Every structure is written in structure tokens, then in C-alpha cells.
Image: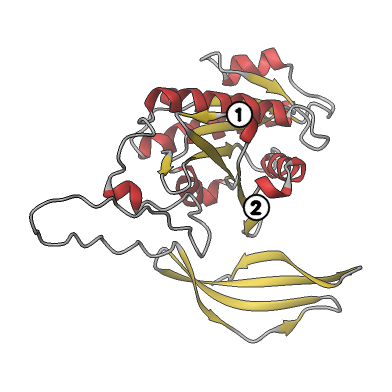
Amino acid sequence: MALMNYAKREINAKIVYYGPGLCGKTTNIKYIHSKLRPDSRGKLLSLATETDRTLFFDFLPVELGEVRGFKTRFHLYTVPGQVFYNSTRQMVLKGADGIIFVADSQRSMLELNIESINNLRENLAEQGRRIEDVPMVIQCNKRDLPDILSIDEMSRALNPRGLPIFGASAASGDGVVQTLTSISKMVLHKLQQTSPSATDSPSPEQELAASYRALRKDADRIGETPKPVVVPPARPVVPPPPPPPPMVIAGVGAVQQAGLDRLRIPVTLRLHGVPQNFHLQVLLTADQNGPVAQVELLEREKS
């Protein structure tokens, strides 16, 4: 759910792109990141698996206005599409304020689209939430491909609630911004109805709340110095220790050369307290400023 940052006077809201594998979630979020001003967006980060990736970044859309004196910072996430990454889907979906369901318009993908939206319903239920209570829009992606279903056909199969539905081609950017604008306005409308007044005093829990960068190694901590209150002497309140980060580096193995321009690095990551082994592949390129290193693959070590 949305978190209040009283120090920066910001509300942090989370929007998740959900859908089957290879439906265009990653293409959507990359296109949006490329079109935002660098001073209003965060860094695009990626957690790669063997066949899919989770991408995330944050941005501050000043043109959408404020909610009771607070600016709204959106955090955009994608979820892995493959079924065997469902635990990661649940982690990313937790606390979502809005959902963009990205459906593949190809006729052959209809059953996978239905399976994915049912999976979304089940994962929300696992968290004690109803899909009907979460702001949501549907994007029918890949409208530029042959043998696709009409928007009406997809709406009958996926949209019995009559949610906003958009045709799109994320590869060219068609419909991408319109989809995000629609869900952003829905989330803002709900925040305006449920957010406390900006003049309310923050609770200690709100002062110590972490931002939504749940997958970053170094989560931003937010807080505000409490105003002095004249009260009789009392035992000082000791705030609880911050939760451990969801991911820490537990060990790094020897760097191996995997080609003329690639390095392969074995790493051990502790994900929510559970150590797991991965191989990080780094692609080395060069531009006019010199060498550039880019993470190309992060694959789980097969046991």
C-alpha cells in the first residue's frame, strides 16, 4: 500500500505490470523509462532469471499534481511471466496500489492470458486482497502482429468487470503511455479518497517506514525528526531495528573469462535469508567515454 514520506512530502505508490511470459511487460517499462526526463526517474534495475526478468524503477510525475499537498512518486515493477517463478510474482505484487495486466493479443496466447489473470486473482487472495478492490487496467499488446484477437474478443475473455482496456504495441510505444496514464489517474483518485491529510502528525511507524525499493540492496530509509512535546519524564521510546534487506551478497567466487568480451562471476546471494548460488555474466563494451560494463545474465546455479 502507498507509503507516506513526510520528510520529502511524497506518497510512494506501487504499480505492477502483470501478465504471461513474453507478453511485453519488459518492453513497456523500458519504453517508459527511456521517455522520462533523467532528473525525474530513478535507475532502471533488473533481477534476471534463466528465462525472464524483474525490472523496476521509480519516477516523479510532477504533471499529475499533488494529493493533499504531497507529491506522488510511482514505483513501476514487472513480474516474471513463467509459472515456476510464482513466489517472485507474489513478492513483487505485495503492496501494489495499481496493476496493469499486459495480455498478448495473439490468438494462440488466449489460454495463457486467462491462466495468468486467474493466477493474479489467486496471488492477491493469498495476500488477503480481492482483485476487484485493486485499481487495474488491461493492455492488449502486440497489436502489430498477424492473427490477433479483436479488442472485443479479448475483453469478453479477460474483462468481465469492464475495466479500461487499451490496444498497444509496446515495441513501437503505441498505447504504452496511455495505459500508464490511465492506471496512474486511478491510483491517484483512490489515494485522494483514502490518504490522511498532509497536516496530520505522522506516526512513529510512518516515520520509520521504508520506501518501495524492496528489491534494491540498499533500501532508502525515510524519517522525520519528531517535534518536541512538553510531557512528564518518561522512558524513551526505542524504535524497532530496521528489517534486513531482502537481498545481500554472501560471497563472490573467482572471475572467469567467458569470451573475448565477457566475464562470468559466481556469486552467492542471500535472498530473504536463504543462500542461493548464481552466475553473473558481464558484457564489456566501449563507447566514446571508454569501457562500459553491462550485466547480461544472472542465472541460478543448477543443483
Taking the view exactly as shown, the residue that stands out farthest to the front is: 230
Labels 2, 1: front one:
1
Residue 38 seen by the camera? yes
Give the numbered dot on residue 129.
Answer: none
Mark 2 or 1, nearer chain start: 2
| Position of residue 165 in the picture relative to residue 296 (left or right) | left
Residue 274 place in picture, x, y as percent:
41, 68
**Closer to the camera in the image, 220 or 131:** 220
Give the numbered dot on residue 52.
Answer: 2
Secondary structure under the numbered disc 2 in the rendered image: loop
Taking the view exactly as shown, the residue that stands out farthest to the right is: 288
**Closer to the camera in the image, 191 or 88:** 191
Residue 231 place in picture, x, y as percent:
12, 51
Residue 111 seen by the camera? no
Secondary structure under the numbered disc 1 in the rendered image: helix
**Closer to the camera in the image, 99 or 253:** 99
> Crowdedness of circle 1 by 10 Å Cα count: few (<14), some, many (20+)?
few
Quadrant in which residue 302 is drawn: bottom right
Task: State the residue position of label 1.
Answer: 64
Quadrant in which residue 129 is drawn: top left
Q: Is residue 180 above or below residue 273?
A: above
Q: Mark 2: which amino acid?
A: Asp
**Number of numbered discs visible in the structure rendering:** 2
Residue 123 place in picture, x, y as percent:
43, 38
In which quadrant is the N terminus drawn? top left
Residue at the spot x=48%, y=29% of the render?
Answer: 67
Cα separation, mark 2 vs mark 1, equals 32 Å
> Crowdedness of circle 2 by 10 Å Cα count: few (<14), some, many (20+)?
some
Residue at the spot x=35%, y=34% of the render?
Answer: 199
Residue 272 place in picture, x, y as percent:
41, 63
Q: Mark 1: which amino acid?
A: Leu
